[in-house]
Amino acid sequence: MVVALYAGAVATADVWMPALARAFAEAGLAVDLVRPGDVPPEAVEYIVYAPSGPVTDFAPYTQAKAVLGLWAGVERVVGNPTLTQPLCRMVDEGLERGMVEWVAGQVLRAHLGLDRFIGRHTPHWEQVAPPLAPERSVVVLGLGALGAAAVWMLVTLGFRVTGWSRSPKAIEGATCLSGAEGLEAALARAEILVTILPNTPETTGLLNARTLALLPRGAVILNPGRGNLIDDEALLAALDAGQVAQATLDVFRTEPLPAEHPYWRHPRVTVSPHVAAETRPASAAKVIAENIRRGEAGEPFLNRVDRARGY
């Protein structure tokens, strides 16, 4: 019997624990799923973890073979000095599908200019058709599992897609760039810019006054990645100057976004309340089960975090 500790949010334990139990049973795993305090820490073999949960000190879990995250982001735990066990982040079908659908919907909204029609209640017959997808350049920053899936969807829709990542990648149908020079080249062609980057020291403030100025004038920014990526003051200035025509933001440096934040009142900003890529228990639990199966079989874990890179 394998002992796994549920160390996610206490408020959602009644949802997660049954989903995990079902996934373990379906995978044929004999797992004793416990809560903090049910067993001594040294009896725990796997920690099912979320930063919103009760575990902050991993040192007592001396026999834990892995910390299996329920969140895609690991920035709140990857630097924890007590964390010596392998750390795996969550990448699952539901989370990926949610991101793809959000990106596809928001890109099409910007591409088709739907904001011109939504909420209009006065006669205005302007029969101007938008360009077709092959005439629109869309750039995706970040080509991890979620970014690559978004690129694939946008390519399927027919857009001219460029992807950028720190290290070289290849995705069929898209132009892939990397490194500092590649970033500047990508931004220069981004009529619609989608950012799906992790939260690392290298990505903090990546979109600032200098880099926003590289965008084609009137570009649209969609950020379902991480809030730290954007210099908020620089983006607001770019919006006011018309350099950026519109921004739809799903993530922020402080969440929930404070009521006094200028984004709430800016006419060219849409606030989306961090819903682009929500972890779904039914599908995510299967990933946890598979990683426990792998751990017990001596196989490599899925989605293991590279501590040096921070994701």
Image (cartoon, rainbow, N blue to C red):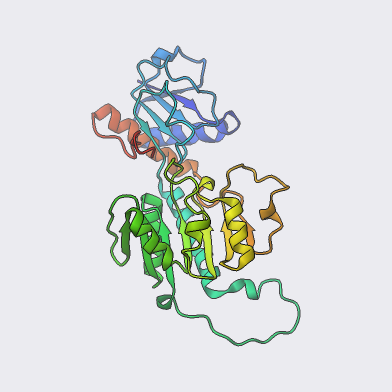
Quarter of the view holding residue 79: top left
Residue 152 visible from this viewpoint: no
Residue 282 visible from this viewpoint: yes
Nearest the camera: 64 or 244? 244
Residue 3 in the image: state x and y as whole percent: 39, 21
Residue 283 in the image: state x and y as whole percent: 44, 44
Residue 49 vs residue 260: left or right?
left
Q: Quadrant of the C terminus?
A: top left
Looking at the image, residue 261 lies above or below residue 76? below
Nearest the camera: 47 or 168? 168
Q: Residue at x 52, y 80 (%)?
A: 130
Q: Quadrant of the N terminus?
A: top left
Quarter of the view holding residue 295: top left
Nearest the camera: 2 or 138? 138
* Name of the residue lying farthest toward the left: 298
Q: Residue at x 46, y 14 (%)?
A: 39
Residue 307 in the image: state x and y as whole percent: 35, 33
* Name of the residue lying farthest toward the front: 210
